[in-house]
Amino acid sequence: MNAPEFIDTAGKIVADGKGLLAIDESTSTCNKRFAKWGIPQTAETRRKYRELIVSTPGLGESISGAILYDETIRQQKNDGTPFAKALIGVGIIPGIKVDTGAKEMAACPGEKITEGLDGLRARLAEYFQMGARFAKWRAVFAIGDGIPSQGCIEANAHALGRYAALCQEAGLVPVIEPEVLMDGAHTLRTCGEVTEEVLRAVFIQMHLQRVKLEGLILKPNMVLPGSTCPKQETVDEVADATVRCLLRTVPAAVPGVAFLSGGQTGELASARLNGMNLRFKSRLPRALAFSFGRAIQEPALEIWHGDPRNVQAAQQALCHRARCNRAARRGEYNATVEGDHRKHTAHAISDLELAGSAR
Ligand code: 13P
């Protein structure tokens, strides 16, 4: 019997030093990001922004797949081409966020459970018809006094297992995203302990629910000190702690890990990914890739500002950030690569300022 196609797709997602671009912000999250820059929060501005991203020249050189949101996969470019078709046309695999959000977990203050299983089989079949070949489901775990609880870890891991099995049944690669949040003053060591516990629970569920490990991608957090922890470890220390955690918890059959950025700056996310690949790439059983949202998009969104005159400069900034992460996958990201990016971004911003002063 031939191997299912989703196993081949999982390999393609992490092949050639590329990674995923997450543009699957829900409508409310996308609106919040727009509000920060005074961009109107309408379906049309969201469509224009996603068109800017999808049409970025050269994006497919660094990006293997793009994660869309339900609204976005139903939208088209100005010329009528559906976004999923446009992505396929430039060699980027379309993916889709299929959870319906992390909601307050009953009886567990400060904890969340991700919803979206009801009706999922039918939704996956529809997304497959629309061209999606992988899906994403995000579970979130906050670190705090007595949390995450065993109940929260088990419930979310179980939901991830149900989601992953349904994805493979529908021919889609499940990207499983158990995110331990970096908010708080906890130490790197605590983040490592919690991440280990979460990943163990997740892979027990993958096993119990008969998910094929060769056909999934893990999208975890890096092991980091909390954002307000006074001690912030070096890039190398983060690389060591993250790789140790993955070696202890992720079965070797899993073809790839694609980290989320979780609120790190673009530069730091690239540097830490680079540190892992530089130090461990030759000794690891799998690819260490990226599936960044903010860490790739932020400069582009700031430059765009909702103004059509800034589209090209924003696309260049997006492409540069994606290239930096491709370099990080090879362990070749350094000040020169980032310097080009900075020069480019500074140039784009000064062009903008010039354009602004001429207005
Ligand atoms: P960030 O890289 O901005 O954390 O986004 C990744 C993502 O897909 C969140 O679910």
Image (cartoon, helix red, strand yellow):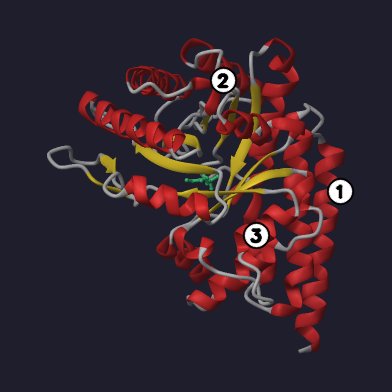
Given this view, does label 3 or label 2 mark the residue nearer the observer?
2
Query: Going 36% across and 18% down the picture, which residue do you hit?
Result: 197
Residue 258 location (% of width, % of height): 59, 33
Which residue occupies 78% across, 84% down? 357
Circle 2 SS class: loop
Q: Amino acid at mark 2?
A: Met
Query: Real-space Cα distance between discs 1 and 2?
Result: 49 Å
Left or right, 314 with reference to 159: right
User: Label 2 near label 1: C-beta < 8 Å?
Assistant: no
Q: Is mark 1 within 8 Å of ligand 1?
A: no
What quarter of the picture does the C terminus occupy?
bottom right
Comparing 144 with 293, the one in front is: 293
Q: CA distance from mark 3 to mark 1?
A: 32 Å
Q: What residue does disc 1 label?
A: 340
Q: Residue 98: tell me if it is visible.
A: yes
Q: Amino acid at mark 1?
A: Asp
Q: Is residue 236 above or below residue 119?
A: above
**Residue 91, relative to residue 227: is it above or below?**
below
Q: In the drawing, does residue 73 fall left or right of residue 162? A: right
What number is the disc on residue 85?
A: 3
Q: Quadrant of the N terminus?
A: top right
- How many residues crowd mark 3 within 10 Å: few (<14), some (14–19), many (20+)? some
Reading the image, the residue beneath label 2 is: 1
Percent x, y of residue 226 = 45, 33
Task: Give the camera-side residue of 20 and 189.
Answer: 20
